[in-house]
Structures are given as structure tokens and as C-alpha cells.
Image (spheres, rainbow, N blue to C red):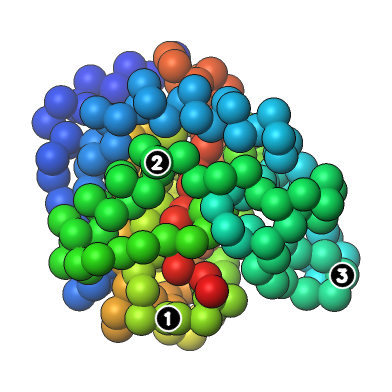
Amino acid sequence: MKTPDLFEHERIGQREFLGPQAVVLRGFALPRVEALLPALALLQTASPFRHMVTPGGFTMSVALTNCGPLGWTTDRRGYRYSPLDPDTGQPWPAMPEVFAVLAREAAAAAGFDDFQPDACLINRYLPGARMSLHQDRNERDLGAPVVSVSLGMTATFLFGGLARADKAIRIPLYHGDVVVWGGVDRLRFHGVLPLKDDPHPVLGRQRINFTLRKAG
Ligand code: MD6
Ligand code: FE
């Protein structure tokens, strides 16, 4: 690690509001990392990470997989949620209990009671990978929040407004941070700047982000 994370202890437990109903819960996932990592490793054996193609014909720099009853996919025909992994023809792996429990607790901590996710999209960023500005709007019930968990290398998250051209703020997301957003902030544009190559002591040269949603 080139830049030791000297201030982690001061961040843990802090809440940073990005909007009225969007909040970063610093270090919220840290107590569960030791349970999350083996669950992540196991589900990748059933549905490995892969680079999908957008409707516009671009191959995503981020590799993705899913777990839970529904998984987010993209191809030339569009974005959608599907119960089957298009690469294996099989259902996505079950959502590990620790994912669902973490999501429920984070949602409750942010003021969204009774969150019951049915989809978990898992993104893997290697150095240079990025996510361009987008809205999450493929979920049927936009009343439910999205819970987003970051592990590994630090990323710079972009959080904009309800229009693509609105100015976006930049927020670092560290290993163990959880972002929850919903309500009036549910359709805010957001993205991730190209990942800097600054290896993480536990996960090495990658960032894993998983987002839990109620999609169906
Ligand atoms: C990422 N996250 O952090 C990308 N979407 O790698 C997202 O696109 C995202 O973090 C909806 C809600 C939370 C998120
Ligand atoms: Fe998103």
C-alpha cells in the first residue's frame, strides 16, 4: 500500500450525507468483512466475473456478476434483470445471508425500514476501470433504496443530480464503506472515476463493489 490509510479509525462510524436521503456510512461493513470475503469467493465459482457489452456496443471496463433471485445484465438488446446467468444458463447463486443482513441493517441505519433485497450486482474494478455517469432505474420499485458496499482499493465516487449535466461532487469510498440511497435521491446520476493503482492490504489490486436492490 503506497498511501497508508492513517485516518481509518477516525472515519469509522461517521455518516456523510450526500443528499436528504443518501448517506455514506463509513466503515459500516468492516465488522462483516471476514464473512463477506469467503461468500464472495464461493459465488464466483458458480457465476464468474465477466465483462458485459452495453446496448451501445461498448464492453464495460468493470467486470460483473450477481447473486440472488434476480441479476442485472446488459447486452446489445438492453439492460434488464434476469433470473438466469446468461453465461451458464443457470440461476444466479443464492444471496448469502450475510449480504442480506448487512443490507437490511445499513438500510435501517439510513432510515429505510424493512429492506428486502432480491438482487445483488457485484462489480469488480481493476486499476483503470471506471463507471460512467448513470441512473439506476431498471428496478420496478423505485421506492426501495439501493445499498452499496465497497471493498478493497479506494475509489472516487461521483454523485450528481437528477439531470446528467448537473455538477457532480466527488467522494472517496474506502474499504468497508456502505452507501445507502433512496427516496428523493433514488434517481441521482452517479459514477466512478478510473481506479487508481494503489493496492489494498487485504484485497490487493482490485475494488469490489456490490449493490443490493429490490428489483422485481
Ligand atoms: C460503484 N456504484 O460504486 C458503482 N448505484 O462501483 C453504483 O453504480 C451504485 O454505488 C446505485 C447505488 C449505489 C451505487
Ligand atoms: Fe449505479
C-alpha distance separating marks 3 and 2:
33 Å
Tell me if residue 195 can be seen.
yes
Which residue shows up at 52% across the image and 70% down it?
Answer: 215
Residue type at mark 2 is Glu
Residue type at mark 1 is Leu
Q: Position of residue 45 (x, y in %)?
A: 69, 29
Tell me which label, 3 or 1, sits earlier in the chain: 3
Secondary structure under tag 3 reads: loop
Which residue shows up at 31% across the image and 64% down it?
Answer: 115
Q: Position of residue 212 (x, y in %)?
A: 45, 56
Q: Quadrant of residue 7?
A: top left
Left/right of residue 146 with respect to residue 38 in the rendered view: left
Q: Quadrant of residue 41?
A: top right
Q: Is residue 199 above or below residue 99?
A: above
Q: How many marks?
A: 3
Q: Nearer the viewer, mark 1 or mark 2?
A: 2
Q: Is disc 1 surrounded by few (<14), some (14 to 19) or many (20+) residues within 10 Å?
A: some
C-alpha distance separating marks 3 and 1:
25 Å
- Residue beneath label 1, please? 142
Q: Is residue 172 above or below residue 4?
A: below
Q: Is disc 2 surrounded by few (<14), some (14 to 19) or many (20+) residues within 10 Å?
A: few
Quarter containing the N terminus = top left
Residue type at mark 3 is Arg
- Residue beneath label 2, please? 97
Secondary structure under tag 2 reads: helix
- Residue beneath label 3, please? 76
Q: Nearer the viewer, mark 3 or mark 1?
A: 1
Image marks 3 and 1: residues in contact by CB distance under 8 Å: no
Tell me if residue 24 can be seen.
no
